[in-house]
Image (cartoon, rainbow, N blue to C red):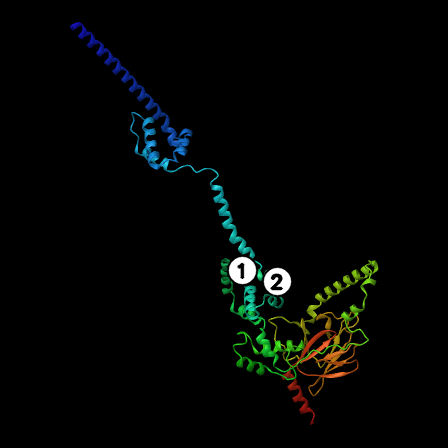
Amino acid sequence: MDKDSQGLLDSSLMASGTASRSEDEESLAGQKRASSQALGTIPKRRSSSRFIKRKKFDDELVESSLAKSSTRVKGAGSVESGRCSGSEPSSSEKKKVSKAPSTPVPPSPAPTPGLTKRVKKSKQPLQVTKDLGRWKPADDLLLINAVLQTNDLTSVHLGVKFSCRFTLREVQERWYALLYDPVISKLACQAMRQLHPEAIAAIQSKALFSKAEEQLLSKVGSTSQPTLETFQDLLHRHPDAFYLARTAKALQAHWQLMKQYYLLEDQTVQPLPKGDQVLNFSDAEDLIDDSELKDMRDEVLEHELTVADRRQKREIRQLEQELHKWQVLVDSITGMSSPDFDNQTLAVLRGRMVRYLMRSREITLGRATKDNQIDVDLSLEGPAWKISRKQGVIKLKNNGDFFIANEGRRPIYIDGRPVLCGSKWRLSNNSVVEIASLRFVFLINQDLIALIRAEAAKITPQ
């Protein structure tokens, strides 16, 4: 009995010794492994973030990002405890491990749509400013004033002179953009507020006339001699009908234009008499038989047309080079033109494109050529191939009356009355002079003519 108990005791002691020996060996091995890991990871952790960005660890992070945050934190704690058994992790390592799962690595294709969206957003205002480049603030203000006056975009396109030559579609798109596009309307309003008051006044003076304004102006008779006081009184009597920037001089100029084109109430356009003689192009076209026309190419005619075109272009260049010589006599008509009269101007022959200043008692009208120099070259106003080289003479008498004498082949029309070759007619203020489809308004400097008449009256009794 004692031998058996002694044997059991020895065997248990031996087993416990071997177990303790194996435990000591395992603990030593674990300490060596931990120390080797610690020695191996310290310099790498200082140089880079390799401790966080390992391949397996990144895969684990991506896979664990689909799980809940609590499970990610627990998994990270178990991995760290398994890696560093036998050594206590520092507080910085705990922060790194706890922060690593909460920041998942975004996939590579994700930033590209964000970048494209950012690029598109940055391009949109650039495109808006690019579109605003052709439309100046002055153009926008002109467009707004003209639409408010006429309520017709077609009339605005035909009657308003913008800084660029816009098409009707561009004018419509710009008007709709000012109405409905908040970005364009805001930028346009800011630009218009920065305009100088003088520029705004000049733009407002170019506003189109509405139908109500032209109806009031048409009531002024064509045979009357209205003065600035007449139009000033018209402004006072109808302040609501006229535009706020209208002046008496602007109303007088527009009334003269309406009289020139027979738009007044007491004016009627007389039809041309039709007889055996063909008077216009439409009548001649009706007499032509289309079946007799042949579409044949005439090389001689084309050569002559080419030569004529070159000659006309050469003449245009010569006229452009000689414009500075004509500045005393001819002044271009613009929206901000200078006053019609000065101390040396007796009268003005005002056309659609230019105006001729009469500064001597006698001037000649016609078409200037290389061999024939005249005072008033009517070719500056428009097509003048039907005008004679010396079409007529305007002369001022001593009593202050102006007379025009026709010396050309074609008649001159004064207020619709023909003046034939060799005849003369008295010119009054605001008379409409028509020479070969070119229309002019003859304006007299009343103040200067009154002085001439007074001097003539003093001389006559002596």
- Along the viewing direction, whichever of 317 and 120 lies nearer the viewer: 120
Query: Residue 448 location in percent, x, y?
Result: 64, 83
Amino acid type shown at disc 1: Ala
Of the image marks 1 and 2, the number of the one nearer the N terminus: 2
The picture quadrant where one finds residue 405 is bottom right
In the image, farthest residue toward the bottom: 461
Q: Secondary structure at mark 1?
A: helix
The picture quadrant where one finds residue 40 is top left
For the point 40% across and 37% down, the residue is 104
Tell me: 189 left or right of 323. Answer: left
The picture quadrant where one finds residue 252 is bottom right
- Crowding at dot 1, Cα within 10 Å, few <14 / some 14-19 / many 20+, comes out as some
Query: Residue 418 location in percent, x, y?
Result: 75, 80
Amino acid type shown at disc 2: Leu
- The residue that disc 1 covers is 177
In the image, farthest residue toward the left: 2
| Residue 301's disc number | none
- Along the viewing direction, whichever of 203 and 317 lies nearer the viewer: 203
Tell me: 363 left or right of 150. Answer: right
As displayed, is residue 439 above or below residue 305?
A: below
The quarter of the picture where the N terminus appears is: top left
The quarter of the picture where the C terminus appears is: bottom right
| Residue 168's disc number | 2
Q: Secondary structure at mark 2?
A: helix
Label 1 close to label 2 by CB (< 8 Å): no
Query: Residue 400 location in percent, x, y?
Result: 68, 86
**Real-space Cα separation, disc 1 to disc 2, in angstroms:** 14 Å
- Along the viewing direction, whichever of 327 and 79 lies nearer the viewer: 79
